[in-house]
Amino acid sequence: MKYRYVYPSIVGNLLLESDGEYLTKLEFIHDSTIEYNSNSSGVFNETIKWLDIYFNVINPDFIPKYRYEKISSFAKDVLDITSKIPYGHVITYGDIAKEIALKRGIKKMSAQAVGGALNKNCICIIVPCHRVIGQNGNLVGFGGKVKNKIKLLELEGNDMSKYYYKGDLND
């Protein structure tokens, strides 16, 4: 059975989903009509505690138990690297691509492929895909909308004058 909980935050409502043992989803809700059923799962309690700490501008010193569902080994590699990006730091899609190419013993990996894999991140914020930026500081590609990427990076103390975005912040 899937359990759901809606967490209100400064970046809008977040949907938490659990299989009862692990957090299986933490994502932005763009549809306010989503129905949810909460249980007293320790996973939700742990995740809510983590989010409360995070949104109070503190780097949590623990990670809630989570697992990915139905992702490729490539996407898992990308998300594992992303999960290790320190609070308050950013890296580029190209940085992740280089690390995966090195790990796989190949000459080159596509930064666009990394972006595609990050699009599969179903544990946002905890697996901090908002900390991944484009070349030269371009704030591209974020499923939770670029305006929320900016809010999360600001919350972590990033100097936003180093970054730019040319499109609609609601994309």
Image: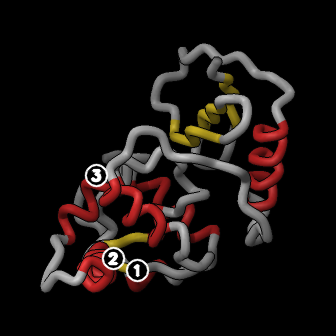
Q: Which mark is residue 48?
A: none
User: Which is nearer the eye, 139 or 47?
Assistant: 47
The disc, 2 or 3, on the residue closer to the chain's N-terminal end is 2
SS at circle 2: helix
* Residue 160 horizontal side relative to residue 8, left or right: left
Q: Quadrant of residue 163?
A: bottom left
In the displayed structure, 85 sits above or below 122; it is: below
Residue occupying the point 47% across, 39% down: 69
In the displayed structure, 70 sits above or below 99; it is: above
Q: Quadrant of residue 152?
A: bottom right
Disc 1 residue type? Ile
User: Dot 1 corresponds to which residue?
Assistant: 91
User: Dot 3 corresponds to which residue?
Assistant: 168
Residue occupying the point 66% across, 25% down: 4
User: Which is nearer the eye, 25 or 48?
Assistant: 25
Residue occupying the point 79% across, 70% down: 61
